[in-house]
Amino acid sequence: TGGMITLDPGYKNTGSCESAITFLDGEKGILRYRGYSIEELAEKADFLEVAYLLIFGELPNKEQLSKFHNDIREESHVDEEMKKILDGFPKSAHPMGVLSSLTSALVAFNPSSVDVSSESEMYKSIVRILAKFPVLVAWAMRKKKGLPLDYGDDTLGYVENIHKMMFKRPNKEYNKNKIAIDALDKLLILHADHEQNCSTSTVRIVGSSHAGLFASLSAGISALWGPLHGGANQAVLEMLEAIEADGGDTKKYMAKAKDKSDPFRLMGFGHRVYKNFDPRAKIIKKSADEVLGDLGIEDPILEIAKGLEKEALEDQYFVDRKLYPNVDFYSGIIYRALGIPTEMFTVMFALGRLPGWIAQWREMRLNGEPIGRPRQVYIGENHRPFVAVDLR
Ligand code: SDX
């Protein structure tokens, strides 16, 4: 019904699952979190509300939201010893690798967050990681910039606090830029969940062994890192910068993308599920225009992106394969305008996806799902006798 797929009864052991969290219709370009359209949530909600909705299934009232935020604030301290782990990484380390390691290391400082089954223990782990992960994200960025590692400010809103932790300069007043904070909040909402994508499936299958929430999230971060998945937002910017350096020759890159002998793909295009416009890409494209306009930024990269999109949408190869811009195509242009380094783009994706991963892990654990154990079609050798090495 409504475009839902029917699953083979044996699906329980294949990594596919039933879920009540996010609905996608790839043909119609529909995305809903717990039944609410992504367009309405991006316009009317804030990221913490959406995190609550994804995890607990309902939009919170004022009291619920305030308690949720205060419970998170209670957990915003990250053990100082964690800085020693961060110090062990070279400045050149990719922040996705750093964050996957730090997220896993958090278990050592929060032993009760190894797997939990009661809802109250689960809640504790959930508010803990929602509090500490943004601190780790800010530390990873500040380490790259050679800035002192700081803690947040509990008087601020959730995303406002993230922005301050990332951008506060030593010995300077924090410049609370509402345009930037609102843009960041919207981007985090748009990345918050996307049903059983590669990294979410990873979180669910690692969690199904009862390895615990933090270990499952650490695995999800690694899966998201790949350039075919969340790493695409960094690859898109690098591609657009290469086109700009190449005199803006978009036709050359379109030809490369269609050349079967060339491994190059148009990053930020195509999707396993969407065979229509990714609804998130539409919202982000509109937001990119607004944010750059409000911040008074003229970015030639945005014009190159729009030119490339126009060409691809009119190109028969792309039309035949239903290749449209996806969530990653325009997001990096906004991150760049907000002063976020390109290497941090996929980390911002992970920050947005955190509540979705948590919601999916919680659903899987509360459903008492069995350990994920995909099967295979064996296509190897038939049974054969051993041959001694001197006879081979
Ligand atoms: C995300 O799953 C999710 O929900 C993911 C995500 C989320 O929110 O979690 O939405 C986030 O990961 C978005 C996708 C970001 N990745 C990229 O932008 C990387 C570039 N895109 C492609 O690598 C590709 O489109 C994928 C990986 C996204 C989807 O790959 P599929 O579904 O396996 O498609 P395919 O490789 O089978 O391609 C089908 C055809 C092929 O040509 P033919 O063999 O039919 O001739 O389309 C071609 C492909 O060569 N093709 C592309 C292309 N994507 C597919 N050709 C050029 N450029 C591209 N980007």
Image (tube, rainbow, N blue to C red):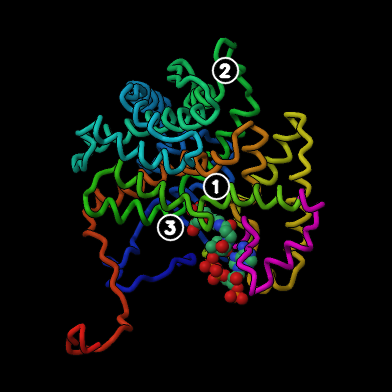
The mark nearer the N terminus, 1 or 2, is 1
User: Which residue is nearer to you in this view: 91 or 81?
Assistant: 91
**Quadrant location of residue 253?**
bottom right
Mark 1, residue position: 38
Q: Are marks 2 and 3 in contact (CB under 8 Å)?
A: no
Q: CA distance from mark 1 to mark 3?
A: 20 Å
Task: Give the label, 2 or 3, closer to the camera.
Answer: 2
Q: Which label was assigned to residue 64? A: none
Q: CA distance from mark 1 to mark 2?
A: 34 Å
Q: Residue at x 25, y 44 (%)?
A: 212
Is residue 262 located in the magenta-colored stretch of the structure?
A: yes
Answer with left or right where residue 325 lies relative to residue 297: left
Q: Secondary structure at mark 1?
A: helix
Q: Secondary structure at mark 2?
A: loop
Q: Which label was assigned to residue 169? A: 2
Q: Is mark 2 within 8 Å of ligand 1?
A: no
